Image (cartoon, rainbow, N blue to C red):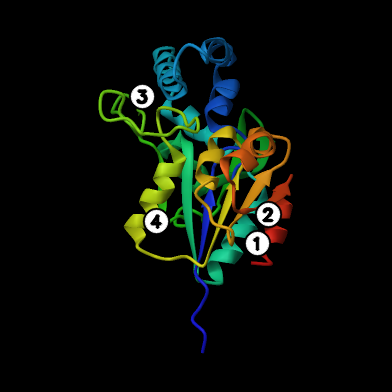
Amino acid sequence: MASPKRKLVVFDFDWSMADQDTDRWVFEVLAPDLRRKMKTLKDEIQWTDLVAQSLREAHARSITKEQIIHTLEIMPYHPAMVRAVSSLKARGETTFLCLSNANSVFISTILKVQLIGFFPIPKSDMVIIQSKGLQDLFEEIVTNPAEWDPSGLLKLRRRVDPSGPQHNCSVGCSPNMCKGEELEAFLARKGVEYDRIFYVGDGTNDFCPILRLRSQDTVFCRSNRGLQKRIHKEGEEKGLKCKVEYWGGAWEIEEKFSQL
């Protein structure tokens, strides 16, 4: 009997697994003026540092832990994506890895729950929350570390400490993390030769890891975003080997995953 085919599915998070950018969403909902400030400063301050600074400013104006958690719980997340990953995991022989420039608290909170109903009642609002059941989906979540301090401040730092050794990426990854190096490190830790690797991504920082994929692997690239532009502009020059398939909505990922 042939041995089962082992698959690795790698997900970016913002605009790939979720239908929003977590960092921007929190401030657009809770403090639009801080979101505007972030937009103004994004070319001057490294993004993870800028999010950390904005979280401190939000805390200083009494935006609470509970408000941030609630904002993450109501962030758009397509039911088809929940079905897609849940069904594929249930079939076995597939390992899931998350490589994200968001942070550990944002991602873990979103994977646990989602808003399924909002019912206005006199003098208050009733919000119904349901578990997505995805908190155990990923073998590892490789992202920027974050934790709540006793005062309710979400303390965020880069995955790659700016005061320590830096990554060696020459493709253009952000200073906080090289996704290509992180993918290779995960494969080395696991010590598994996966028959096929599938990468779901959308942004320019997903270009580096897909350059590490082989001819039998596939990138599911979200259409009309930064990754597609880099594939078209640099893919041939940089020696991109993997297959490229495009998608626009989570229902298409569900369709593709059903065929793996």
Going from the N terminus, do you reach mark 2 or mark 4 first?
4
Assess whether mark 3 and mark 1 are in contact (beta carbons under 8 angstroms): no
Residue 153, numbered circle: 3
**Distance CA(mark 1)–CA(mark 2):** 6 Å
Residue extending furthest bottom?
Answer: 1
Residue lying at 54% horizontally and 10% vertically, measured from the top left: 37
Question: What amino acid type is highlighted by mark number 4?
Answer: Leu
Residue 254 position in % (x across, y down): 68, 58
Report crowding for label 1: few under 14, some 14 to 19, many 20 or more residues within 10 A (C-alpha).
Answer: some
Residue 119 position in % (x across, y down): 68, 39
Going from the N terminus, do you reach mark 4 or mark 3 first?
3
Question: What amino acid type is highlighted by mark number 3?
Answer: Leu
The answer to whether one can see residue 254 in this image is yes
Q: Nearer the viewer, mark 4 or mark 1?
A: 4
Classify residue 216 as left or right of residue 232: left
Going from the N terminus, do you reach mark 1 or mark 3 first?
3
Assess whether mark 2 and mark 1 are in contact (beta carbons under 8 angstroms): yes
Residue behind mark 2? 253
Q: Quadrant of residue 144?
A: top left
Q: Nearer the viewer, residue 54 or 43?
A: 43
Residue 257, numbered circle: 1
Residue behind mark 4? 187
Report crowding for label 4: few under 14, some 14 to 19, many 20 or more residues within 10 A (C-alpha).
Answer: some
Which secondary structure lies at badge 1?
helix
Report crowding for label 2: few under 14, some 14 to 19, many 20 or more residues within 10 A (C-alpha).
Answer: many
Q: Nearer the viewer, mark 2 or mark 3?
A: 2
Q: Nearer the viewer, residue 84 or 205?
A: 205
Which secondary structure lies at badge 2?
helix
Classify residue 205 as left or right of residue 53: right
